[in-house]
Image (spheres, rainbow, N blue to C red):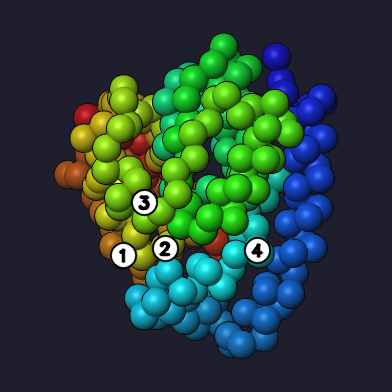
Amino acid sequence: MDSLSSGFVADVLERLHREAEAADAPLVQAVTNEASSREEMITRLITAESRDLEGIYRGFAGNFLSVSPQFGRFLYMCTRACKAKHIVEFGSSMGISAIYMAAALRDMGGGRLIGTDIEPGKIERARANLAAAGLAGLVEFRLGDARETLSSGLGSDIDMVMLDGAFTLYLSVLKLLEPHLRPGAIIVGENAFEEASGYVDYVRDPQNGYLSLSLPFDSGRGNELSIRTR
């Protein structure tokens, strides 16, 4: 079974990717115009997060900041490849990436995805989008700072983690989840920039219990794939 090829999931994803492109185009253009290089853009974003984390993401309340269709298919494939039953996502936004992963859970017989976001409007829209795709029963969305919302109630061992929230919190969130990661768990870091939080250096050091490498597609976005080795 493949929910991405036809049916409610495919239709909802097609609509959401169109909406995301329209909603985010002005922001992408503005960031591109303001920064003379990728390095400058990343530095500006990291500085803004460090100064006012909640404020900057309140300003992005109407933006999807979502994965691409290609990256979404990659998430679906990762979920199926590791036979995930329990997934945690940091930075759920409007729920596009959650749809890809929840679809894979359903296609394998079920499971549980815990998602979290700091913006209440995004959580509301994510819930509606998962419901439209017929996947609401597989996903629990938590509102608030991930360092609090993911500090308890995670249940069984985690098979997969998707990091796609505030760049400077990736390492903090990973360490919070680390005691729950089963050996072989997959960790996907989208926009895991080397300049932010020390996350990339941490997962690339085998002494910390991971094997990790940068992903060759969606270049420039700093995507990182890691596997828990212990």
Q: Which residue is mark 2?
A: 167
Q: Residues within 10 Å of mark 3 (few under 14, many from 20)?
A: many
Q: Which amino acid type is marked by label 1?
A: Ser
Q: Nearer the viewer, mark 1 or mark 3?
A: 3
Locate residue 37: give its quadrant. bottom right
- Report how far apart the C-alphas of labels 1 and 4 lie in the structure: 23 Å
The residue sitting at 17% across, 44% down in the picture is 207
Residue 77 to residue 107: above or below? below
The residue sitting at 50% across, 68% down in the picture is 57
Q: Which residue is mark 1?
A: 197
* Figure quadrant of the N terminus: top right
Locate residue 171: give its quadrant. bottom left
Mark 3: secondary structure = helix
- Report how far apart the C-alphas of labels 2 and 3 lie in the structure: 12 Å
Q: Which amino acid type is marked by label 3?
A: Ala
The residue sitting at 64% across, 27% down in the picture is 135
Instruction: Compare marks 2 and 4 and give the one earlier in the sequence.
Output: 4
* Residue 173 in view in this figure: no
* Residue 171 in view in this figure: yes
